[in-house]
Amino acid sequence: VAEKAVDEPSAAQGLQRFVAAKQEICDVMGQLETSFQSAKKFCEQTWVWSSETADGRQSMVEALRASTGEFVNRCQQMIRSVTRESMKVVFVGRTSNGKSTTINAMLHTRVLPAGPGHTTNCFVTLQGSDQSKAYMQLPGDPTPRDLKDVQSLTDALQQEHVLPPGQSVEIHWPRDQCHLLRDDVVILDSPGLDYDSDFDAWIDETTRDADVFVLVVNAVSTLSGAESGFFHSVCKTVAKPNVFVIFNQWDNLDEDEADVTGVRAQHMSKARDLLVRDLGICSEAELSSRVFFVSSKEVLKSRAGSDSRTTSYTDPSSAVVPGLNTHQSRAREFAAFEDKFEAVITSHAIATRFSRHIDEGRRMASVLTTGLRDLIQHLTDEAARVAERLHANTRLLQDLNRREAKLMDQCDKIIQDVPEAMYTELLDQMQAQVVLQLP
Ligand code: GDP
């Protein structure tokens, strides 16, 4: 059932597949927990009536009772942990390439401060909250701080520029205001790749569990050594990371269409060298659905706080035309990126986040099945032995009954036959006595 939850997580679409898979896995864990509870009760009852015999049975029941008790707790823990699972995307790129703007565009609202210069000097984690007001938490300080406006966050992020990797400013944003956060996506924004070259340390601390990386490149420059260096480091710890490359600020290209095509081809070639040739994390065929040319600023402006996406990803008219660089084409390409991003992050998270829980659930179910099967076999053997003894005793009883009946017959016979003779003899003896005593 758990496997089914992963392979066919209901009819939910897009990011909601993850939410639905989570729900189904929790349901399965709940069913397992009920089974363990019943098995535990069965063991407790079996224990009571098994006191007089059978050491083997007692130790079997005792072991099964202990493990089912432990499994009940484990199921409860796993349900709590699955409920907390989320999908994680990490944004990287050099400072001012537009990471914060891209995140805001995806969230349909200006959550992160964006602007020229070092606006984000530390890691920022953005996650959904059930509270109605946004708040932030600084590392080492659990007190929620009011997030009144973007400026208060800007101040906090700039003050915290000395934060080591592994620590981040947490922004908790009302879930019902952004569909990404509502559907359990956690976003990690990183300081610019030019900010710190000790990638290994921060990859270890922050990106090991990422489902997707989004590399934001400024389209008017090019992919740099820092960017490829970062992903070479990622590949040392993550076998095949899912990487999207966004050439942002595509609206800044004011050349004619022929040049646009040329610049696009150059960027594509650089992206191919990195993703296909050097890292081997994407095939040639996949490349066009991993590299996008967009204007996050325009998308953010057009969405202006609306939570619904206006561009249809599946609409054939939204197909990307490489030579074209218009506001509409950039908007479509951004939507195509989001479409692919949602598909990849959901599939990866479903495939990786729950496997540990599913394996453990399967192992526990197998321990219970084997234990119950052995115990039932043991009880069946014991019942057969008892029945055999009962059968032998019944035969003995029947034999005794038969003998008793025979004896009774004999007694009746004696009672019927013997008294006549006995009376005669007695009478004779008494008469003889009487005769002797006569004077
Ligand atoms: P970050 O440092 O990578 O997070 O970059 P920001 O998101 O703060 O953006 C840096 C600057 O680039 C800001 O002034 C943005 O308004 C601007 N910017 C971001 N995306 C675009 C875009 O698509 N087009 C244009 N023209 N400017 C952009």
Image: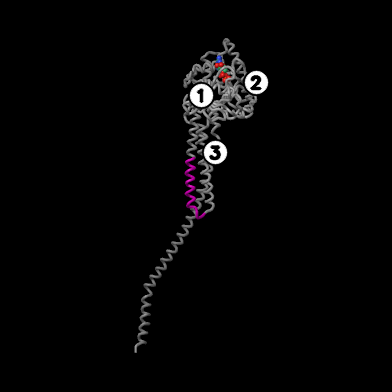
* Residue at horizontal 46 percent and vertical 60 percent from the top: 395
Tell me which label, 3 or 2, sits earlier in the chain.
2
Q: Is residue 431 among the parts visible in the rendering? A: yes
Callout 3: SS: helix
Question: What amino acid type is highlighted by mark number 1?
Answer: Leu
Q: Is residue 285 among the parts visible in the rendering? A: no
Residue located beneath label 1 in the image: 147
Which mark is drawn over residue 225?
Answer: 2
Q: Which residues are magenta?
A: 33-53
Residue located beneath label 3 in the image: 360
Ligand 1: give its quadrant.
top right
Q: Position of residue 118 (x, y in %)?
A: 59, 19
**Badge 1 density bin: few <14, some 14–19, many ≥20, Cα 10 Å:** some
Nearer to me, 163 or 183: 163
- C-alpha span from label 2 to label 1: 36 Å
Any magenta on residue 254? no
